[in-house]
Amino acid sequence: MSDSGPKARPSRRQVLLWSAASWGCMASLGAGAQTPTWPTKPLKLVVAYPPGGVSDNVARLLAERLAQRLNVTVLVENKAGASGALGVNAVAKSAPDGTTLAFSALSPLTLSPHLGKPLFDPVHDIAPVCGVMTSPVLLLATTAATASAVTDFKGLLAAAKAHPGALRWASSGSASLGHVMLEQLQLAAQVSFTHIPYKGGGQQITDALGAQFELLSVNSSAAVLQYIKEGKLRALAVGSPTRLESLPLVPTLAERGFDAANLSSQFGIFAPGGTPAAVLERLNAEFQAVLSQPALRERLSAAECLPLKTSVAQLSRNVAQEFEAMGRIVKAARIVGES
């Protein structure tokens, strides 16, 4: 890894080769490779988002249970900004010994590189470890007086067409999946919103409860679902393969004819590029064991999130596939990042 500055965005061929290389690592491990002594010191889990959100809550439970399994301290550090890219970048520039890890959505590796010069090379500077969860993206309305007519998805489109740009839509940041959802809906429905990018979900939710804007896209969490139940936020649609058990009357965006906006976030664990393959496999096994524990599964279920528990190779393939998909979306919707 070089410290000479931002690298050019990876090509399609590079990303696809990443997946193939992961398979090569798996094959070499099958020949009886021995896992080195690990860990030799406390671990650090960098959460690429602010405290208080579903990603932070899940990461802290992961760290707690991993520490119990390994009998070693696992420190959690929140490093938010640039829709997760700052936290992932900090890990990319860490020693490749498997003791500094990132908990992040895939988007800093799959979406951000299409929107400008990345802070790190997502192909070489970061190594996938283990998928953790899939989190639906919710499209919600606040109690702002200007959102009073937006009682359902049909009302949202009607209001957006009648008053172009009048509805303010907050996302957790530029280059977040919530931002892509907004752009895809604008493109397909030929409507216009005013985008308000935040630097994470915490302040975004606080301001939503204060009715400082009309709409927001946010990852599902137990707290957000409770606000919906209490009538403090209104669910208009969800980005999910199927309707959520806790919101059975709320349609998916695919049901409403907006397949490209029907997005869910994948989250995973990542290590610095160059981390030994045997250490990556040991980490994967430990995280898969933690994800099998009832307490973790209950925490995910309460937030309507689904555990992933992928192998190193499968997470590599997921990243490569999402990179390709995000590239097509960014090009079609002409999405631009922050200047």
Image (cartoon, rainbow, N blue to C red):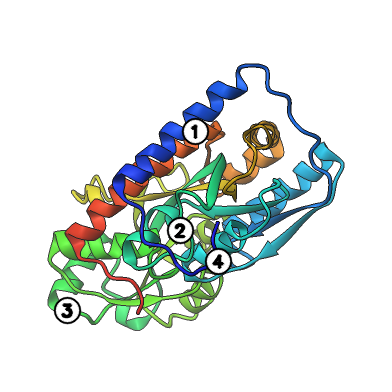
- As drawn, the residue found furthest toward the top would be 31
Marks 4, 3: nearer the viewer: 4
According to the picture, the residue beneath numbered tag 1 turns out to be 22
User: Could you tell me which secondary element the residue under label 4 belongs to?
Assistant: loop
Q: What whole-number distance in Å separates the C-alpha atoms at marks 1 and 2? A: 19 Å
Would you place residue 8 above or below residue 135 in this image?
A: below
User: Could you tell me which secondary element the residue under label 3 belongs to?
Assistant: loop
Q: Quadrant of residue 144?
A: bottom left
Task: State the image coordinates of residue 11 (x, y, percent, origin top left).
Answer: 31, 50
Q: What whole-number distance in Å separates the C-alpha atoms at marks 1 and 3? A: 47 Å
Q: Is residue 310 visible?
A: no
Residue type (three-letter) at the residue carrying disc 3: Pro
Q: What whole-number distance in Å separates the C-alpha atoms at marks 4 and 2? A: 19 Å
Residue type (three-letter) at the residue carrying disc 2: Pro
Q: Earlier in the sequence, mark 1 or mark 3?
A: 1
Question: Residue 108's mark?
Answer: 2
Residue sitting at x 20%, y 65%:
334
Residue sitting at x 34%, y 50%:
263
Residue type (three-letter) at the residue carrying disc 4: Asp
Badge 3: residue crowd in 10 Å (few <14, some 14–19, many ≥20): few
Question: Residue 35's mark?
Answer: none
According to the picture, the residue beneath numbered tag 4 turns out to be 3
According to the picture, the residue beneath numbered tag 3 turns out to be 164
